[in-house]
Amino acid sequence: MSILIKPIITEKATMDSELRNCFSFQVNTKANKVEIKKAVESAYGVSVEKVRTINVRPDRRTRFTKTGVQHGKTNAIKKAIVQLAEGETIDLYANM
């Protein structure tokens, strides 16, 4: 089971990393805070102070087409916001 899926690089997440030294990741929905902390520390070689998690519900859509009404939804994901120790940072753009 892979715990870290991908980093979240949005305008809000980038501002959070610059101001509060917090980095956002999309993680496995079954992972808990202890597993997320160990995965970030081993993958990036930093020390983690705090982990906050968010379960994001799926978005549901209804489309009216010629063939009838179609229902669809996106996948539910889990986000983790990881706060690092003072003076440490993660370079997310290094391996692009």
Image (cartoon, rainbow, N blue to C red):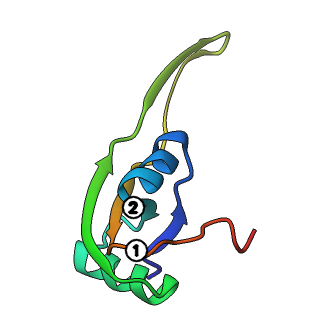
Q: Nearer the viewer, residue 72 or 34?
A: 34
| Residue in the image at 28% along x and 52% along y | 54
Provide residue 84's location: percent of width, then percent of height: 35, 71
Residue furthest front in the image: 87
26 shown above or below 56: below
Identity, as a three-letter code, of the amino acid under mark 2: Asn
Do the residues bearing badges 2 and 1 touch, measured as CB atoms within 8 Å?
no
Identity, as a three-letter code, of the amino acid under mark 1: Gly
Q: Is residue 67 left or right of residue 28?
A: right
Q: Nearer the viewer, residue 64 or 22?
A: 22
Q: Quadrant of residue 93?
A: bottom right
Q: Is residue 10 left or right of residue 81?
A: right
Of badges 2 and 1, the one in the foreground is: 1
Q: Nearer the viewer, residue 28 or 87?
A: 87
25 shown above or below 39: above
| Circle on res. 65 | none
Q: Quadrant of residue 51?
A: bottom left
Provide residue 66's location: percent of width, then percent of height: 67, 10
Q: Find the distance from the CA under tag 2 to the CA under tag 1.
A: 9 Å
| Circle on res. 21 | 2
| Residue in the image at 50% along x and 85% along y | 43
30 shown above or below 37: above
| Residue in the image at 27% along x and 59% along y | 53
Secondary structure at numbered mark 2: loop
- Residue located beneath label 1 in the image: 87
Secondary structure at numbered mark 1: loop
